[in-house]
Amino acid sequence: MVPAPLLAIDGLSARLRAPPHRPLLRSVCLDVREGEVHGLVGESGAGKSTIGKAVLGILPRAIEPCGGTIRLSGTDLLGLSPARLDAVLGTEIALIPQDPMTALNPSRRIFDQLTDGLRLKRRLRGQALRDKAVALLQDVQIPDPEAVLRRYPHEISGGMRQRILIAAAFSLDPKLIIADEPTTALDVTVQKEVLRLIRKMQRSHGTGVVFVTHDLGVVAQVCDRLTVLYGGMVVEQGETAAILAAPSHPYTRALLDATPRHDRTGSGMRPIPPQVAAALQAELARYGMGPGAHV
């Protein structure tokens, strides 16, 4: 018997609240197993971050879900009251945000920001709180954690800031983490270290991860399974290795061809063929999702 997925998204649709209520997500279905890293990939505007925000219950006010369910361990997140959702955030679902340069409050010390969840939801205080903060920074391989905890964000590097955000996401041992393009603002060397760290932390905690990215190179490194999105709809999903080795959808093949590769002669980048883009736009148009509909 196949165990129930940790996260099950079934027929999720979303649209703009204001007329003409343009659709943004169309019947998205995917699941994430316990201890799995599941990639959401597609070009900018494919709807990847919108799905992540829907799971977290933090969609912008201009966007509303209009169909489907999002279940975490069997609980429909879309049906939760604000108070119950607040209780779930951090403890059962957490976020690793996209930009470490802006995600931390510049006016607060690292200790205060790292321990917000521990104080509010675990009621830790005093030495127990400080010991936990030190342990979290040690887990993400930050040297001299006591000194770092006393600093402000502008006093540490971008890579170290991202490690702190990773530590904060794992601090309450959530079942699921949404990693929203967590390496976008980092240079290649630091990006590799951060990806290795996320994978290490995810395995040691047994956490499920939804990894939002546009980078197929990142997907190949960290994701067990993969969902490919275009314009708010799923075009292909399955095991990462199988999809990257033999993609079945023309759009997935076009994404792979558009990725620069050192082992390919000629042009380093191949644009998505016009006929593929035209076919996808025609499919979107049948659902009222024409050009400019993506988010």
Image (cartoon, rainbow, N blue to C red):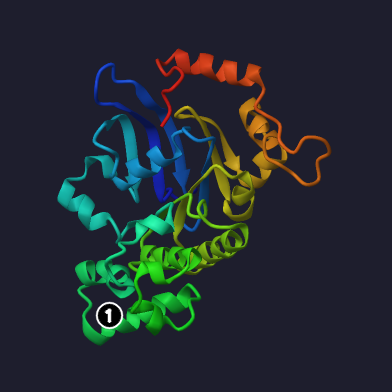
Q: Which image quadrant is residue 29 in?
A: top left
136 in relation to 62, above or below? below
Q: Residues within 10 Å of mark 1 (few under 14, many from 20)?
A: some
Tell which residue pokes out farthest to the front in this image.
154
* Drawn side of residue 227 relative to residue 294, left or right: right
- Kind of residue sitting beneath label 1: Leu
Please name the residue shown 24% across and 36% down the image.
Answer: 61
290 in relation to 134, above or below? above
Whether residue 280 is visible to the viewer of this picture, yes or no, is yes
Q: What x and y, as percent, mark residue 82?
A: 17, 47
Q: Nearer the viewer, residue 139 or 161?
A: 161
As helix, strand or loop, the secondary structure at mark 1 comes to: helix
Q: Which image quadrant is residue 154 in?
A: bottom left
Please name the residue shown 34% across and 49% down the image.
Answer: 72
* Drawn side of residue 239 relative to residue 286, left or right: right
Number of residue marks: 1
- Residue that label 1 marks: 129
Q: Which image quadrant is residue 109 in?
A: bottom left
Q: What x and y, as percent, mark residue 30?
A: 46, 39
Tell which residue pokes out farthest to the right in this image.
265
Please name the residue shown 42% across and 58% down the image.
Answer: 100
Whether residue 76 is visible to the viewer of this picture, yes or no, is no
Q: What x and y, as percent, mark residue 250?
A: 65, 26
Image quadrant where one finds the C terminus = top left
Please name the residue shown 26% across and 40% down the image.
Answer: 78
Tell which residue pokes out farthest to the bottom in this image.
127
Q: What x and y, as percent, mark residue 249?
A: 63, 28
Q: Nearer the viewer, residue 179 or 235?
A: 179
